[in-house]
């Protein structure tokens, strides 16, 4: 077991049940690097997940406190938890289904409220644990098991959505960008507010096999790399380009949600106490 | 000289019959059921409310938004009911007592969270102020359409649920404290199934002073060590799990181990189900809350719960005045179903606010002879005293509920 896994993970849950060549374990290792470089202990971080490949493969791997919410609801659970335990760091590791489809409304409103959590959206561009159906982040035209003639819907970029909703830190990386991802996750964790990091990664078994025609991990990684560069290995232009990097950084620029509620409490209770004191003074004079 | 027939004194079996005698200092108010539900929650130690506005439960949200900050609590207006109940589950997992309130359309959306809270044994309280349906129905009219929905409030089976129903504003206050206590002791969400009439009506309400120590309130305890899930055990009073204390607890939607991580084994499925079902089934007596009247000599017994139990009870007294040996059972605990109340070989007339017949099916199952169980369904309006008295008279004299306008007798 690597040193970071020994320090942070739950030995009984390692290795995960992820498929051969899946990017989830690699990205989790990068998250551990960021956590370690920031000096956090197991007890400082609450690890929340959802449902699907990313939820199932990462849930309970964290050695500290964990929750695996129902599909899409990790951020709703985290909203309640953050109120009760405001001093913890929340790492919410979810897939594209959780973040960009079934749980999008919670994503948008957590961003709007500036809830103090870091969402890592690990995006394998489809519903892969159910056998490879398209999702709102599958590129148009690509073949999946529920788009055998090519996906006809346009996808959307979840980074645009959370930025518009008010997220204070938004970034996009891919499974081909190790050091950049670690740096970005470190920045995300230092924002006392809503941070969103979108990380695309390859699925060999479904997206790779059906959309790209290969179960070869390196070829699938190469396809992702080409689309971050805008050109293929042979120099010809890619069919589209993902812009990676920090897309919006307004870290610590506005109050975190649970703090707003705590401040409200203080104001209301101070007003109550002042009123009570005034009433006492009046009745005694 | 006026005499009181002891057979006609109501017999209330509920913990608050004793609490009422102990809490003496307080305020007498004229208030709504929604106010009583809110103050009951706050007295029970509720410090988080997350919900979505919906008639007739909205006033609970509004009262909470005013009251919670005053007592150091938090009001959250969720983006939908799915979020509302998940937020409550999250807050409870963090160690704060939490409640949400809704009506049928929102309650349906909460089933996702209900299952999650139930399997993870997270204490919290859900209020469903029922209105007539299906779906939006008539927003300002009472219904009792969620009797089974509240029992089977999530999918997948392998669980029991606790559901309580008040029939007055004062009872709504005490029952809310009771609901919180049960949710802590049984480590499960508890539903308060109330209705538009009890929520919206204004009545006499006694609220104990906040300085009055309510020693019957079960405080939140924290489980700081393994096992986090006592699978295979029906034990009560296991402290709830807490996230944020570094215990390493795992909470999820999956069939779990004692530690809480997911496992796909028959033994684990069996042990988890044993826990979720039997912690409730094996403690039915501790969950038994009801009111009876006139059962001593009764040959025909009216059965009801919630708001319409009030007119049904008066209907029973009217039937007795007409010479019918009538009795009355008001269920407060709806689930687990109190089968033992229906062991007597009598005729039962089940009055409920729906035409399809829900409570009546459980009474048919529990009673010695289902042919002696009669249905009296009405929808969107309470049963009148005259209707109930006439029905009881008809059943006593001719063995059937007579034809009455807007009353449904076929099940």
Image (cartoon, grey):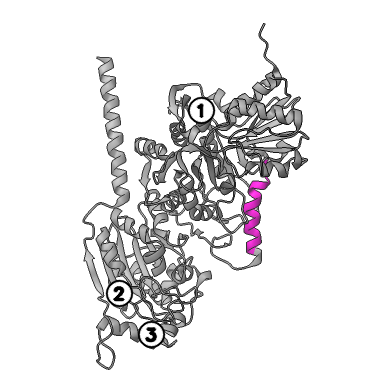
Decide which of tag 3 and tag 2 comes sooner along the chain: 2
- Is B278 magenta? The answer is yes
* Separation of residues labelled 3 and 2 (CA atoms): 16 Å
Co-location on one chain, circles 1 and 3 = no
Q: Are marks 1 and 2 in contact (CB under 8 Å)?
A: no
The residue at 43%/32% (across/down) is: B35
Q: Which residues are magenta?
A: B268-284
Q: Secondary structure at mark 1?
A: helix
Location of the C terminus of chain B by quadrant is top right
Given residues A92 and B228, the one toward you in this image is A92
Indicate the position of residue B320 as horizontal and vertical percent values: 69, 21
| Residue at which label 2 appears | A173
The part of the image, by quadrant, that contains residue A77 is bottom left
Residue A71 against residue B86 in the figure, above or below: below
Compute the Cα span from label 1 to label 3.
65 Å
Q: Which mark is residue B170?
A: 1
Q: Splitting the image into 4 quarters, where does residue A137 fall?
A: bottom left
Kindly report which numbered mark, 1 or 3, lies closer to the viewer in this rendering: 1
Magenta span: chief secondary structure: helix
Residue of label 3 = A220
Badge 3: residue crowd in 10 Å (few <14, some 14–19, many ≥20): many
* Figure quadrant of the N terminus of chain B: top right
Residue at 29 percent across and 64 percent down: it is A161
Q: Which chain does the numbered disc 1 sit on?
A: B
């Amino acid at each position: 077991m690597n040193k970071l896994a020994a320090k942070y993970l739950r030995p009984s849950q390692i290795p995960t049940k992820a498929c051969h060549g899946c990017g989830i374990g690699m990205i989790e290792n990068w998250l551990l690097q960021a956590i370690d470089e920031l000096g956090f202990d197991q007890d400082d971080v609450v690890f929340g997940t959802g449902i699907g490949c990313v939820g199932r493969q990462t849930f309970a791997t964290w050695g500290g406190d964990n929750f695996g919410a129902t599909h899409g609801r990790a951020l709703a659970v985290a909203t309640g938890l953050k109120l009760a335990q405001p001093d913890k760091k929340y790492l919410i590791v979810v897939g594209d289904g959780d973040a960009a489809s079934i749980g999008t409304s919670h994503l948008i409103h957590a961003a709007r409220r500036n809830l103090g959590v870091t969402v890592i959206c690990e995006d394998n561009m489809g519903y892969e644990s159910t056998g490879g159906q398209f999702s709102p982040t599958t590129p148009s035209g690509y073949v999946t098991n529920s788009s055998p003639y090519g996906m006809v819907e346009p996808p959307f970029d979840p980074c645009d959505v959370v930025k518009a909703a008010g997220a204070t830190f938004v970034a996009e990386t891919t499974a081909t960008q190790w050091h950049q991802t670690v740096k970005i996750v470190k920045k995300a964790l230092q924002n006392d507010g809503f941070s969103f990091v979108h990380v695309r990664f390859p699925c060999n078994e479904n997206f790779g096999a059906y959309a790209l025609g290969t179960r070869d991990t390196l070829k699938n990684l190469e396809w992702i790399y080409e689309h971050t560069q805008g050109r293929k290995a042979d120099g010809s232009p890619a069919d589209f380009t993902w812009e990676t990097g920090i897309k919006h950084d307004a870290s610590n620029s506005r109050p975190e949600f649970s703090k707003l509620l705590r401040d409200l409490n203080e104001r209301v209770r101070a007003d109550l106490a002042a009123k009570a004191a005034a009433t006492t003074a009046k009745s005694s004079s | 000289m006026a005499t009181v027939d002891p057979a006609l004194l109501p017999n209330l079996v509920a913990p608050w019959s004793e609490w009422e005698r102990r809490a003496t200092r307080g305020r007498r108010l004229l208030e709504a059921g929604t106010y009583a539900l809110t103050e009951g929650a706050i007295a029970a130690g509720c410090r988080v409310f997350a919900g979505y506005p919906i008639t007739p439960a909205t006033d609970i949200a509004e009262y909470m938004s005013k009251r919670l900050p005053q007592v150091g609590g938090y009001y959250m207006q969720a983006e939908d009911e799915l979020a509302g109940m998940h937020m409550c589950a999250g807050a409870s997992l963090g160690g704060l007592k939490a409640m949400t309130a809704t009506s049928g359309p929102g309650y349906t959306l909460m089933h996702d969270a209900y299952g999650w809270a139930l399997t993870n044994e997270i204490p919290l309280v859900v209020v469903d102020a029922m209105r007539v349906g299906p779906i939006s129905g008539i927003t300002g009219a009472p219904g009792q359409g969620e009797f089974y929905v509240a029992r089977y409030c999530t999918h997948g089976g392998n669980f029991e649920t606790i559901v309580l129903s008040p029939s007055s504003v004062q009872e709504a206050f005490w029952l809310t404290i009771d609901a919180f206590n049960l949710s802590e002791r049984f480590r499960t969400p508890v539903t308060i199934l109330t209705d538009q009439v009890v929520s919206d009506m204004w009545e006499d309400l006694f609220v104990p002073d906040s300085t009055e120590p309510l020693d019957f309130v079960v405080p939140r305890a924290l489980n700081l060590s393994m096992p986090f899930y006592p699978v295979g055990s029906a034990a009560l009073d296991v402290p709830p799990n807490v996230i944020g204390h570094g215990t390493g607890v795992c909470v999820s939607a999956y069939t779990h181990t004692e530690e809480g991580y997911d496992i796909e084994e028959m033994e684990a499925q069996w042990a988890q189900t044993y826990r979720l079902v039997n912690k409730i089934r094996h403690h039915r007596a501790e969950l038994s809350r009801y009111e009876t009247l006139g059962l001593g000599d009764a040959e025909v017994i009216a059965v009801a719960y919630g708001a319409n139990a009030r007119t049904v009870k008066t209907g029973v007294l009217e039937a007795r005045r007409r010479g019918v040996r009538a009795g009355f059972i008001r269920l407060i605990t709806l689930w687990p179903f109190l089968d033992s109340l229906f062991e007597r070989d009598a005729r039962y007339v089940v009055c409920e606010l729906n035409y399809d017949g829900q409570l009546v099916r459980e009474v048919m199952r529990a009673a010695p002879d289902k042919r002696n169980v009669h249905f009296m369904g009405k929808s969107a309006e309470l049963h009148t005293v005259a209707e109930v008295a006439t029905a009881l008279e008809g059943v006593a004299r001719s063995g059937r509920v007579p034809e009455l306008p807007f009353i449904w007798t076929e099940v």
